[in-house]
Structures are given as C-alpha cells and as structure tokens.
Image (cartoon, rainbow, N blue to C red):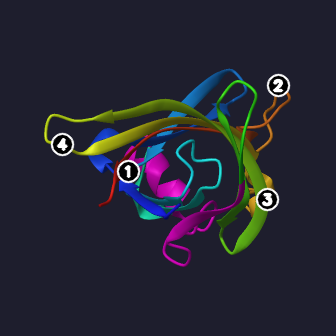
C-alpha cells in the first residue's frame, strides 16, 4: 500500500494548554502558529509518522504581560528557542479504536519521550471534494523536565505555577493527492 501524506487544516485546528495558577484555578493558553505533517499507509493511521512544530512566539493566554513572561528566558526563551517540536516514533491502535502516539518532544533543546491519546473523529469529504480527518489529542507533561522551572513559593504553601501542564489539541488534516 502506498504512503499517503496529510497536511494541517489550520483554519480548523487548535493547540491549547492548561496549567494551575496559585494552585486554585487553571489558566488556558494556546500556541496559535503551528504545523502538523502526517504520513501513513494504514487507513486507521496505526503506522503514522507525525511531525508537529509550534512557534513559541505565538503563545497566547489573552494577557500580554503573561505572554511576554512565557516567551522570556524565565520560561520558553522564544527568541533563542523559537520552536517546540514533536516527532512520533510509534503509533498503535488502542482497544477502543483510538490511537496511542509515542514520540519525542523537544522544548528548549531538551528532548524527552512523551505519549498521548489521539481520538479519531473519522474521515469525511468536505463540500469542495477534499478528504479530511480529525483527531482530539490529550496529554499531560511535566514542564520542569523540559527546563521550564521558573516558579515562586506561596506564603500559604504551594507554588505560583503547577509543574503539570495539560495539552489539548483539535487537529484537522487534509489528504494530499
């Protein structure tokens, strides 16, 4: 079977992250500029090769001061390390039909293995004849493992920013001819 290439439909995709602030509420942000490329020969994507890049200068939490701090050397150091990158090394079908994706995430030149679940939304043809597929992605990483260690202790105990970061993405891909 031949390899099929799928490219990002950016207008119908998003990448969000959620992190506890002051240990009492959750702040949500996004990476607004990113790309995903997928190559697969299996209709169920179980042999997919996935590459994701996210532009760290596009981080958006709807707060300019916080966004600036996240882009600074305290966190991502977006000027020195402008992208984060994920490259898959194994994709397998789970018993519920979803995919388990394993690979390496690189942030600030630190590469660590991660895995996530990708829930398939199926395949459909849009009104213009394009074949599309969609996935809902969900995982959690420890930001400190990637050198994102800035924090401050709270007088009441705990810290300003949780180490755990939840990553959620809605990805729509377009099949290439």
Q: Earlier along the polypeptide chain: callout 3 or callout 1?
A: 1
Distance Cα–Cα, label 3 vs label 1? 23 Å
Residue 9 at x, y = what percent?
31, 49
Q: Earlier along the polypeptide chain: callout 2 or callout 3?
A: 3
Tell me where residue 72 sits by quadrant.
bottom right
Distance Cα–Cα, label 3 vs label 4? 37 Å
- Decide whether residue 83 is among the magenta residues: yes
Which residue is the site of mark 1?
Answer: 32
Residue at the spot x=75%, y=39% of the render?
164
Residue 53 at x, y = what percent?
50, 63
Which residue is the site of mark 2?
Answer: 156
Q: Of 45 and 112, which appears nearest the observer? A: 45
Q: Earlier along the polypeptide chain: callout 4 or callout 2?
A: 4
> Do the residues under discs 4 and 2 have CB atoms within 8 angstroms?
no
> Do the residues under discs 2 and 3 have CB atoms within 8 angstroms?
no
Position of 45 compared to 163: left or right? Answer: left
Q: Of 120 and 70, which appears nearest the observer? A: 120
**Residue 113, which numbered label?**
3
Q: Earlier along the polypeptide chain: callout 3 or callout 4?
A: 3
SS for tag 4? Answer: loop
**Residue 129, which numbered label?**
4
72 in relation to 19, above or below = below
Closer to the camera: disc 4 or disc 2?
Answer: 4
> Do the residues under discs 4 and 1 have CB atoms within 8 angstroms?
no
Q: Of 60 and 158, which appears nearest the observer? A: 60
Closer to the camera: disc 2 or disc 3?
Answer: 3
Tell me where residue 127 sits by quadrant.
top left
Closer to the camera: disc 4 or disc 1?
Answer: 4
Residue at the spot x=65%, y=65% of the render?
107
Residue 52 at x, y = what percent?
52, 60
Magenta range is: 61-90
Q: Earlier along the polypeptide chain: callout 4 or callout 1?
A: 1
């Amino acid at each position: 079977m031949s390899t099929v290439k799928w490219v990002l439909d950016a207008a119908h995709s998003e990448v969000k992250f959620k992190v506890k602030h002051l240990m009492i509420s959750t702040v949500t942000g996004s990476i607004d500029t990113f790309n995903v490329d997928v190559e697969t020969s299996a209709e169920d994507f179980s042999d997919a090769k996935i590459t994701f890049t996210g532009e760290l200068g596009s981080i958006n939490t709807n707060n300019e001061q916080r966004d600036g701090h996240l882009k600074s050397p305290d966190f991502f150091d977006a000027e020195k390390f402008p992208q984060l990158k994920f490259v898959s090394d194994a994709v397998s079908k789970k018993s519920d039909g979803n995919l388990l994706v394993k690979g390496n995430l690189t942030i600030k030149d630190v590469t660590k293995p991660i895995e996530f679940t990708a829930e398939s939304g199926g395949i459909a043809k849009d009104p213009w004849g394009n074949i599309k597929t969609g996935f809902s992605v969900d995982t959690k990483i420890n930001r400190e493992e990637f050198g994102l260690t800035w924090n401050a202790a709270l007088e009441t105990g705990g810290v300003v920013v949780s180490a755990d970061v939840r990553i959620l993405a809605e990805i729509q891909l377009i099949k290439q001819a």
